[in-house]
Image (cartoon, rainbow, N blue to C red):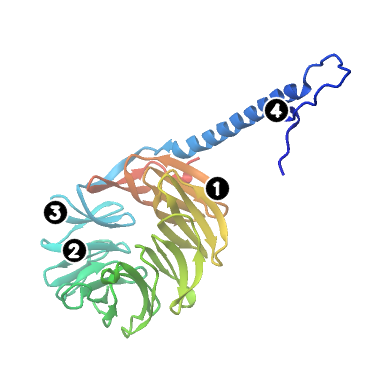
Amino acid sequence: MSVLLPWTRRKPRPGPVVSARRPDPPKRMAGRSRLLILIGVVASLFAAGEAYLGLMGGRRLPGGTTVWETPVLRHADGVYAVGYGSDLAFYGPSGKVVGLPDGADDAVVSDEKVYVAAGDLIMGYGPDGRLLFSVERLPGERLMPCGGLKGILALRPEGSGFGRPWVLRAILDTGGSSPPVRVPGLPAEGAVYGSLIFVGVRDIAAGGESFLVCADIETGEVLWSMSVGQGHFRCVIPLPGGKVFYATSEGAGMAASGRVVRSFRVAGPVWAAAWTDGRAAVSHGAEKNPFVTAFSEDGEELWSGRLPSPAHRLVPSGDRLVALCKTHVVGFSLRDGRREYSFKILDLPLAVEGNLVLFSRGGGAYLLSLDEALADLP
């Protein structure tokens, strides 16, 4: 049912007696209402613009000194990295740690250590540059970090040809290795919890389908495998009780015994995800409208905050969640999602640890030591 406002109703035709015409009150009311509406719209736009400028602007990063820089970045984990300048080297919070062997064709960082594959050997070096082990490399093996593992994963295709399964083994820092585990695609993410290893794989032969695989690392037996769609893996994080939190570019969830037991529903593609203190955090949304959303373990949304650009990494740090975005470093309160700081940057941030920030620039990287840690700034 439509209702005509007072100043839009048709006036009745005049009767035989016509009184003197008075000023039309409805028109005065219309003008006053339009003025009030206009004032409200302007105030809303001003508030929204102020919030947007606060989000998109942000303070400049405080001053600091460059600890080290490498023109070619091979791999990084936290503020540790492998880079190539005059030689291949391992870098840490204080600078160059150790030069690595000539002829290395693969080098990855995991848990403050570096692992190198060169010729028919795989070697591991500690945070101080000390050689931890040197073992035989099987033909075709490449290296992949594995969360929670005191060592590294070595991967190789099973035979030749398109769409073959892959075989992985864990090489421990002691020099020992686990039985081989056979998975249905190329491993992309991995993590261990006790005797369980969880691996996210992508089967190109199956049209790019992604699978989450759980195996017993002590026996090599695959316990279960499940499809999680066709997204690219963002993280695989084991939880107590045989559960695992995972995220792909299509979404995030929790699995156990080969089935999804919880979904963390977000809008748009997923860019990054993290788990801390019984909470999931997911960076998601369109490039021009990105958010970070926190959930309880039960899948209940706790809070959601706007980001100036998509966060490619989320770093839990005490009672804060630090979002490393393309254009900013943003800190949120984990408890209620309040934005505590936002710093505008010129180069892509890869990691934050205390007053250290690792940046990517061109094909290389540099570690910046800030005069004061971000969390300590007012």
In the image, taking residue 371 as reference, residue 129 lies left or right, namely left
| Quadrant including the N terminus | top right
Single out the mark in the foreground, 3 or 4: 4
- Label pair 1/3, CB-CB below 8 angstroms: no
Q: Residue at x 16, y 74 (%)?
A: 161
Provide the residue designation for mark 1. 338
Residue 34 shows up from this direction: yes
> Foreground residue, 68 or 244?
244
In the image, taking residue 374 as reference, residue 110 lies left or right, namely left
Q: Residue 284, position in %: x, y?
A: 44, 54
Q: Crowding near pointer 1: few (<14 within 10 Å), some, many (20+)?
A: some
Provide the residue designation for mark 2. 106
Q: CA distance from mark 4 to mark 1?
A: 36 Å
Single out the mark in the foreground, 4 or 1: 4
Provide the residue designation for mark 3. 87
> Foreground residue, 29 or 303?
29
Residue 189 shows up from this direction: no
Provide the residue designation for mark 4. 33
Q: Quadrant of residue 97?
A: bottom left
- Label pair 1/2, CB-CB below 8 angstroms: no
Q: In the rendered view, tell whether residue 303 sits above or below residue 341.
A: below
Instruction: Specify the amino acid type for callout 3.
Output: Asp
Q: Crowding near pointer 2: few (<14 within 10 Å), some, many (20+)?
A: some
The mark nearer the N terminus, 4 or 2, is: 4
Instruction: Specify the amino acid type for callout 1.
Output: Arg
